[in-house]
Image (cartoon, grey):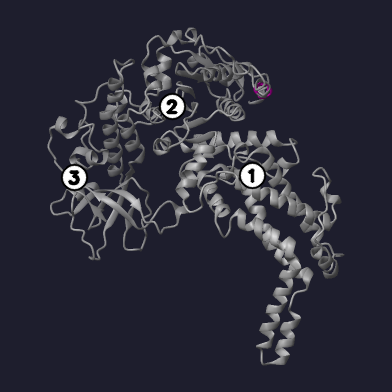
Amino acid sequence: MEGVSSSTSTSTNKKKRAWPKDDFIDLVFSWSIENIFDDTLYENQVEKIPESFESVEHYLGSFFFLLLEETRADIAASLEVDYWRHIFSDGKEPYRTLPGDIVIISDAKPETASDLQRLGWNWTFASVTNISDNENDDLNASTNFKVKVARDIGIYKGVQKSFYIVFLINSIPNKRVWNALGMRNNLDIIEKVLCSGHAKQRENKCDVCSTSINDGPAGEVVNSLLTTLNVSQANAILTSLDTLKCCHKPSIELIWGPPGTGKTKTTSVMLFILLRMKYRTLTCAPTNVAITQVASRLVKLVRESLKNHSAEMDIVCPLGDILLVGNKDRLKVGHYIEEIYLDYRVDRLVECLGPLTGWKHCISSMSGFLEDCVSQYHIYVENELIKLKELADQEEAQKEKAKISSLIDFARSRFNSTASSLRRCMFVFCTHLPVCFIQEENFERMVRLISLLDCLEGMLFKENVGSKELEELFSSQQTIEVSSEAVLDEFSLRCLRSQCLGLLKDVRQSLGKLSLPSAMSKESIKEFCFQVAYLVLCTASSSYKLHSLDIKPFDLLVVDEAAQLKECESVIPFQLQGLTHTVLVGDECQLPATVKSRVSEEAGFGRSLFERLSSLGHFKHLLNIQYRMHPSISQFPNSSFYHNQIHDAPDSKKYG
C-alpha cells in the first residue's frame, strides 16, 4: 500500500475545512467520524441553487459545497448500516475492488462505526488508486491494489499483517464532477445555459444558417426514417437537428417525453439519422441501464435497416461507427451489443493487427496454401518419413507410416486452420471498422472473400474430390478470369482458387494503404476507435475520459433521461472541446436524481438542467401521444401533470 500525507484536522471551523480548489479526496480524508455524522457540517456554506446565475464562476461555484455535503451523506449512510460486509485481506474471502473505492482499513474487525471511535483503535480511510496490472482485465477488479491513505497506521513494506477492509463508496463519479467544476475547457454551452430569455429562443434562429436538415440528397434518408414516427416525434427530431446546420450559435433543445410517449424510440431514431448523415455525436445518460437501452435500440435499428439491403449485409453487420464505453459489468453488456463495446472491439482488433495472428499473416498463409499446397504437402511427408527412420521398431514405424495424411486430408486440415483465422480477421474488420474508413470497395472485397472461402470449403470437402484431382488443381499455374458477378455456387474448384488468389492480392494491397493502428499499444487502438467512430455512447460520468483524448470534436451531445441527471453532472460532457449543440431528452415530472443529504435536497442539488430550463420557460418539444396505458389510467397523470396535452394512441385501449 502507498501512504501519502493528508490533513486529519478535526477542527470545527467549517470554513477552514473546505477549500474548493483542493484535491477532492484530500478534503474527504480531512473528515473525522464525527464530521461525517454531522448533518450540519456544510449547512452554513451551502446556498440554495438559484434559477439564474450572474456568471460562469457563480454557476459552477454553486455546486462545490453541495457536492461535498452529498459525499459526506453518502459515506454516513454506508457507516450507519447494521451489517457491514467485512472482507478480509488474508485470502479467506478476497476483497474485489475498483479504482476510486473509499474504504476503511483497520487492524481489528470493526462491528459498528462506533468501534472506530474507541481509544487506541488503529484504522484509516483509504482510496484505491489503481489495481494490479497482472490481474484479469475482464474482471475490472482486483485483490491486489494500491491505496492512498488518510494517515499512517503502521503499514510497512516487508511486514506481513492482516487488515480488515470495509467498503464505503466509490468516489469516481463525484470526483469527476468535482474536477469538471474546476475546468474551463469549453464554455459555449454553459454560457448558453446562463443566457436569459429562454422562452424566446425559438425566435432567435441564426439568419445565416437557415437550411433544413432534410433539404438536399440526405433528406431522403431522413424522411424515410421519420415515417416510423408520429408527427410530434418527427417534428421534435427535425427541429432539434436543424440546429446542427449552424456553426455560429450554440444551442440547447429540449424534447419532453411523458411516460409511454416514446422517448427512447425518438432518441434512437434521431441517433440513427445522425449516424446515416455522418454527424459525430456523443450520447450520454445518467445510468448504465439507460445508456444500454439506447444502445440496444440503436443496434436493432441498424441491423433491421441492413436486412435485404444486399447479399454482403447477410454475412456481416458493420457497426464500426458506433462505440459503447464504460464498465462491462455495470453496463451488463450482453451478446447483442458486445460488438459495439469498446473493450471487446479493442481485443478483437489487437488479434487482427498483430504480427503473428493478424490480417497480413492470415492473407500470406492463405495465399501460400493456394499457391503451394502440393509443395507444402511433400515437405510434410518428407518430415514424417524422417521421423519414421529414427524409429527402431519396424512394426511401430509401419503403424506410424499409415497415419501420414493423404494430400486431400492434408489440404482440408490446412485449409480449415488457415481459413478460420482469415475469416475472423475479415469479419472483425468489416464489423468493427467504419465502412467510410475502410472504404466501400474494400468492405465489399472482404465480404466477397469470406463468401469465396465458404464456397471453397464446400467444394474442397465434397466426396468426389480426391488427392489426384487436387494435385492437378494445385499444380496448375494457369490463371482463370472469373467475373465478380458470377454466381459462387457455380464455380469450379479451379475457378474458386484463381478468384481467391486474385482477391487476396487486392485485399492485401488495399488494406495496406489504410492508416491502421499498431497492435503493440492497446491505448493507441482505443484512441483510434474513438477517432473513427461517429456515435459514442456512455454515461455522463464516463464522458470525463474523453477530455484526455486527442480526438475530433463532436457535432452534437444528446442526453437521454436528462431529467434524472443532476445539473452539476451535465457539466462534464458540456465542456468537451468544440461542442456547441446539445439535445436534452427527458421529463421533469418523473422521478429526479437520488439525493441522500437533507441539506443538499433542500438546496436543489438533485434538480436537473432540464427541469431548471423548463421552469424558466425554455421551449420544449412535447411528445404528445402515449402508447403504454389504457385511457382510464392515463387520464390521471395527463390531467395532474401534463395539462391534458397528451393524447391516447388509437390502440391504447388494449392495455386494460
Vertical position of residue 446 compared to residue 617: above or below: below
Label 2 CA crowd tier, 10 Å (few <14, some 14–19, many 20+): some
Residue 308 screen position, x and y as percent? 75, 36
Task: Tell me the kind of residue under disc 1.
Answer: Cys
Residue shown at 56% from the left, 42% from the top: 340
Any part of residue 586 in sight: no
Label 3 CA crowd tier, 10 Å (few <14, some 14–19, many 20+): some
Q: CA distance from mark 2 to mark 1?
A: 30 Å
Point out the image quarter for the C terminus. top right
- In the picture of the structure, the residue carrying the numbered disc 2 is 578
Point out the image quarter for the N terminus. bottom left
- Magenta: predominant secondary structure element? helix
Residue 256 screen position, x and y as percent? 51, 19
Residue 211 screen position, x and y as percent? 58, 14
348 in the magenta segment: no
Provide the secondary structure element on which disc 2 rests. Answer: loop
Taking depth in this image into account, of 602 and 507 the one nearest to the observer is 507
Vertical position of residue 124 compared to residue 62: above or below: below
Position of 516 with respect to 470 (left or right) is: left
Label ID, residue 6: 3
* Residue 611 found in image quarter: top left
Segment tinted magenta in the rendering:
222-227
Q: Earlier in the sequence, mark 3 or mark 2?
A: 3
Q: Earlier in the sequence, mark 2 or mark 1?
A: 1
- In the picture of the structure, the residue carrying the numbered disc 1 is 430
Task: Tell me the kind of residue under disc 3.
Answer: Ser
